[in-house]
Amino acid sequence: MPAPQLTEAAIRQYASAESFERGSAYYEQGQVTSPVLRGTTLYAEVEGSEAFPYLVRCTFATDDSIEASCTCPYDWGGWCKHIVAVCLCLIHEPETIEERPPLERLLADLDREQVQSILLKLAERNSSLVETIESEVQMLRPAVPQAPPQASAGAPAPAHRVAIDAKAVRRRVRSIIHSLDRMRSSEAYWHVGAVVNDVRRLLDQAWTLIEKDQGRKALTLLEAVTAAYLEEWENLDDSDGEASGFFHDLGPAWTEALLSADLNRTERKAWAARLTEWQSELDQYGVDKALDCAAAAALDGWDYLPLQRVLQGTITSRGAWKGEPPDFAGDLTRARLNVLERRERFQEYLYLAQAEGQAQAYTTMLVRLNRAQEAIDYGLRFLNAPQEALALATALYEYGEREQSLHIAEHGLTLEGPRAALAKWVRDKALTLGEKELALNAAEHAFRAEVTLDNYQRAAKLAGDQWPQRRMALLEYARTAKSFSAEGRVAVFLSEGLADDAIVTLEPYTGHELIAKVAEAVQGERPEWVISTCRKQAEYIMDNAKAQYYHAAANWLAKARAAYQVLKREEEWRTYLRDLLQLHARKYKLVPMLQALQQ
């Protein structure tokens, strides 16, 4: 099959500017190894500073979204540099990626005995797989058949449901966590994220049950996962908060499962007590409020009097609460709305969304119910943020209300909050609908909300004859918009040949990759600055860094040499290099790199 289509612009949407720059450096240094494409999933290893490479997995969906994961500990938002490096390899060196059939295709033509033989061989090679296989098998076994209750006339036959073996789930969680037991602690640290992700797959199964409105079975699964994880999670290194962070993933699932289970009051009180007990234990480790919302969902259920009044259409200033709403009020409301939507209780959904000020949920549901004008009128009065306007505008656009969608979106651009996503949506949709002036204004909004080269170039393309005046205004904005990352602003200045602006934009703590990019770009215009900057970077590495970084010092010196050549000061360069060789004569790994620069 053809390789997935991917662009650097798409990668930048998933990664921070710093991660993109570092990932670019990793790719250019050839640290991506063993890339394999199986169907729509790309696997690769990326060499890092540790003894073992990081494992990257990227799955490309038909809607152009990408689900990516890495075994590194990065947890600061967006993709890590290793994922970026692998995706850049896909873009620039697709010929290096080996294509193999997906696993499901490999297994499709095998009979039961052949699959069983493969599993047995794998278990022989890795004994830890035995318990994993056992747990998976027991989780898939159907419940023991019982005599069904007498069905009423015309009632549909009950659907076959898979039983949840709580003991098997517990064993599976323990097995996953203890898979690190044979590693040194320094090595196990780097695999905590992968372990938590394996446990998270069990949580995904709970969400599947919740979305099918099988709340009781979801509770059985969640109880087994939570209890086992709570018993064992201290065996994981939580320096980066990955192990404890899983409890915050559990909370929303518990909340919706409890609301989906149709429990009686006694059952709800028991679940609330259990969750409160678990949260008290977590409080001792600083894992605050992970299960508080779920405990409230269990205690209040659906018969909480203020909630009942709202669902019956009584809208008051207090919403669905007796007194001051708790900190988790928004989370609990969204969980209730999700359950009401799944059960197609749309009028109650609207009452609750309106009472709780959930303007986005309220208006988008009105659109889905073919009540677009009500949604528009309400949105113009009560939308509070650009992202809410974007949600409503998108819903209107999808339901054929194109002009009205742009009207709502324009209104959203006047609201306080992050506007980049909304502005780019307006820019693209307005252009599609032939609203060129609106598209241009939105393009400028997008640039002011997110200073990037792509946004700048799109504004330039839309401006046409108006570009000279608008260009000056946008460049001046880029010079003063210091709250944005230097990477985007530098890219804009370099595209316009504004060397001095690019240099001034570099901050004291700017990453090495961006400094190098500027040095290469302004070599012909500002060679003196290139020499000074590159020598400073190289000298710091040679004086202070470990031998493994000497190649970086040599790269900086190569840039300095090129700048000397621009100034026709080759003799000065040779003198400087001789001094370096004399100063670092005992550094046997560095000397050959310096000698290579004599040529």
Image (spheres, grey):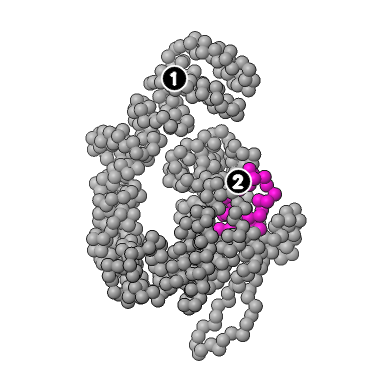
Query: Where on the picture, by quarter, is residue 206?
Result: bottom right
Query: Where on the picture, by quarter, is residue 305?
Result: bottom left
Comparing marks 1 and 2, which lies closer to the viewer? 2
Q: Position of residue 267 (x, y in %)?
A: 51, 76
Disc 1 and disc 2: Cα gap in Å? 40 Å
Q: Which mark is residue 388?
A: none
Horizontal arrangement in the rendering, residue 219 relative to residue 524 (left or right): right
1 or 2: tag closer to the N-terminus: 2
Q: Which residue: 68% across, 47% down?
A: 183
- Residue 19 vs residue 471, the one in the foreground: 19
Horizontal arrangement in the rendering, residue 595 relative to residue 301 (left or right): right
Residue 174 appears in the picture as rendered: yes
- Residue 19 vs residue 215, the one in the foreground: 215
Quarter containing the C terminus: top right
- The main secondary structure of the magenta stretch is helix
Q: Which mark is residue 189?
A: 2
Q: Which mark is residue 532?
A: 1
Q: Which residue: 58% across, 60% down?
A: 230
Q: Secondary structure at mark 2?
A: helix
Q: Amino acid at mark 1?
A: Ser
**Residue bounds of the magenta highlight:** 175-200
Mark 2 Cα-neighbour bin, 10 Å: few <14, some 14–19, many ≥20: some
Whether pointer 1 and pointer 2 mark residues with C-beta atoms closer than 8 Å, the reply is: no
Q: Which residue: 33% across, 70% down?
A: 322
